[in-house]
């Protein structure tokens, strides 16, 4: 059995034996083993080649993506300074807007005069800077989407900056109106001896319209301007006695009557708190007091509506 051999017979078409080939069993087994080894080797090389090809394709794709990302980063690096400047301008504008809006302060403080911007770089009501919020959103995006996000941020930032500019202009006007509004008492005397409206006249004893507010006090007590304005009249005016009229702009005027001494001149510019006159009892008066009027477009208004302190 050990020497068993296989005979391969090759015949032609007539059936005659042409050749006999004797092959040992071990040779056949060795041949099959070699063929199997060759087949396995070829299959392994094919699989390896396909794997290397796939890796090469992926490597090439990664290389292309890296090239694309490098271009994106260069583009973003050029856009970042503009975005940062726009962000900083918006932060400063927002801080100024927050300050000038008067939000979070008492009306009395608002009436005293303009406020200075705090210069804070944080969003009001939070401790997180705007830059942190922007950076966090950018990091959450796919790299290829970054240029579009930067374009959106730049457009939104410009729109916000433009809107802030308009709001700041509005609040600048509002600040100017407040600074020209007679919103504090013209004298520190606490005694209101007669209010605005119809009353019985203390001299004639008949019901008449009282166009202002009578503030009692001492002779010579200081009377100060309740806001910015320009003196447009000084002198004696009938029953008002010695009188000063100050124009504050925006159609507003204040009138000070029954004065003992006038301390300003026509054309003089006044700031809130500047000395205007001294309290007296000139004209139709029953004692030292200030007759104080606020008029808008010539129409007398209740001064109490303007006094905030």
Image: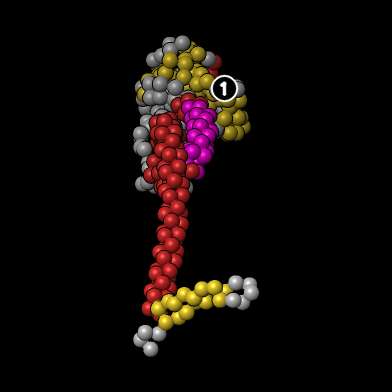
Q: Nearer the viewer, residue 111 or 43?
A: 43
Residue 276 coordinates in the image, percent (x, y): 41, 19
Colour pattern: secondary structure
Q: At numbered mark 1, what does the secondary structure look like: helix, strand or loop?
A: loop
Q: Residue furthest top?
A: 266
Q: Residue furthest right?
A: 14
Q: Nearer the viewer, residue 31 or 7?
A: 7
Specify the quadrant of the image occupied by residue 211.
top right
Residue 41 coordinates in the image, percent (x, y): 40, 64
Give the residue at x 45% y 80%: 6
Give the residue at x 49% y 76%: 20
Specify the quadrant of the image occupied by residue 271.
top left
Residue 32 coordinates in the image, percent (x, y): 43, 73
Q: Is residue 11 shown above or below 54?
A: below
Magenta segment:
145-172
Q: Main secondary structure of the magenta part?
A: helix
Q: Quadrant of the C terminus?
A: top left
In the rendered structure, does residue 164 fall within the stretch colored magenta? yes
Q: Quadrant of the N terminus?
A: bottom left
Residue 97 coordinates in the image, percent (x, y): 45, 34
Q: Nearer the viewer, residue 276 or 219?
A: 276
């Amino acid at each position: 059995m050990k020497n068993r051999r296989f005979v391969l017979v090759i015949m032609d078409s007539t059936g005659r034996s042409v050749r006999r080939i004797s092959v040992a069993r071990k040779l056949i087994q060795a041949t099959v083993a070699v063929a199997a080894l060759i087949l396995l080797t070829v299959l392994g090389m094919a699989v390896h080649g396909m794997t290397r090809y796939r890796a090469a394709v992926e490597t090439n794709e990664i290389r292309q993506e890296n090239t694309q990302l490098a271009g994106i980063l260069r583009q973003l690096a050029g856009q970042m300074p503009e975005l940062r400047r726009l962000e900083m301008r918006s932060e400063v504008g927002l801080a100024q807007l927050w300050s000038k809006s008067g939000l979070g302060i008492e009306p009395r403080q608002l009436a005293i005069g303009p406020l200075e911007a705090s210069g804070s770089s944080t969003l009001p009501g939070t401790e997180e800077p705007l830059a942190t919020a922007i950076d966090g959103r950018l990091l959450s995006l796919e790299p290829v989407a970054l240029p579009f996000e930067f374009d959106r941020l730049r457009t939104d930032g410009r729109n916000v900056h433009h809107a802030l500019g308009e709001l700041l202009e509005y609040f600048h006007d509002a600040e100017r109106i407040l600074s020209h509004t007679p919103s504090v008492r013209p004298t520190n005397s606490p005694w209101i001896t007669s209010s605005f409206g119809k009353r019985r006249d203390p001299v004639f004893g008949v019901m008449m319209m009282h166009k202002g507010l009578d503030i009692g006090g001492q002779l010579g007590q200081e009377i100060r301007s309740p806001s910015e304005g320009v003196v447009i009249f000084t002198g004696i005016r009938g029953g008002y006695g010695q009188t000063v009229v100050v124009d504050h702009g925006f159609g507003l005027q204040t009138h000070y009557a029954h004065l003992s001494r006038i301390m300003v001149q026509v054309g003089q510019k006044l700031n809130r708190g500047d000395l205007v006159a001294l309290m007296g009892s000139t004209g139709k008066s029953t004692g030292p007091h200030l007759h104080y009027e606020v008029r808008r477009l010539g129409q007398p208004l209740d001064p109490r509506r303007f006094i905030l302190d």
